[in-house]
Amino acid sequence: MSNVQFIRSIHGLLQIYDYECFSVILKNNAKLYGEFITHTFRDNISIYQYIKNGGLIEGWCFSIYRDIIERDLYEMIVSTDNWTDEKSKYIKVLYTLNYHDIIIKIKILYIHNIEDIHYNYLDVLVNESGIYLDIHLLQLDRLGLHLIYIPQLYVNCPNPFREICSNIERKKLVLIQNKTALSKKTIANIYKYIDNGWSYKSPYMHMICSENEKKTCPICTIKLDKNMIQLSCGHCYHYECWNDHILSKINTKLNELIFCQQCDFGSEAWKMICG
């Protein structure tokens, strides 16, 4: 992606500074991330449209800044909902704000500063941010746009920021193997993107073409043709049949098992999706 394309792409994202509530949050060392950046970056949807459609703004911050953030947002806050963990390493706060008669929902993960040499705040951030796609790793803070963290997937990548921006530009989904996040997301979350033109290619699913294949599809029992997929166990299905099978399990969690229809092979749902 050229620099000109990049600047043009983030133009919609820059509208966030037109809202005083976001300026308050960013100046107080909070960081914003998640779907709203992807949508405004890729689809050129305005922040206003995103919020009007019920979109949630997500962010994180160290808990020492919570009081000052809530002080500066005080006149806009309609309600707050809190969640915390048993070990008190973080607290999540969902703010409902009224900004010039616009209802805005912002969820902030406040991470506590714990004086423990074995404590790593990044572990809390990785597990509790809910990020399961690389396109959600973009982070906006008072210094600009960069990555919230570098997942194992991109440890050896020379320029992960560029790679992720390129994936957004190409509407390509790359899944991050975060067990906590995958346990909270369903197949429907992936298909929400696929239905809007995004591509998803599981590294465990194989598209194969063979005119000489004489076997039949286990689902429809019709002879296999050129357009088929092969599971890791070696069994083949029509692409459409397997896709319909996956769609019948649309509410399955991404870390739950889906099984082959011919043997006892099973694997996590995210590995069995063919997009």
Image (cartoon, rainbow, N blue to C red):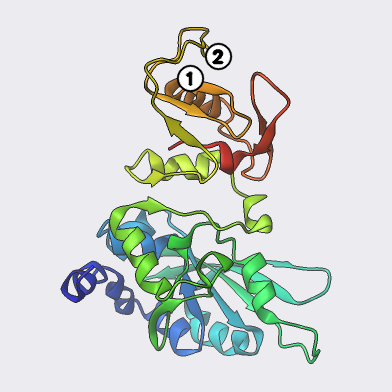
Q: Secondary structure at mark 2?
A: loop
- Dividing the picture into quadrants, the one containing residue 112 is bottom right
Q: Contact, CB < 8 Å: mark 2 with mark 1?
A: yes
Residue 186 drawn above or below residue 20: above
Identity of the amino acid at label 2?
A: Ile
Which residue corresponds to the image point at 30% horizontal and 57% vertical from the top-left?
A: 49
Q: Secondary structure at mark 1?
A: helix
Identity of the amino acid at label 1?
A: Cys
Residue 224 drawn above or below residue 36: above
Q: Report the number of numbered marks.
A: 2
Q: Quadrant of the N terminus?
A: bottom left
Residue 155 drawn above or below residue 46: below
Q: Which residue is mark 1?
A: 241
Q: Which mark is drawn over residue 219?
A: 2
Residue 101 visible in the picture? no
| Left or right: 43, with 74 as reference point | left
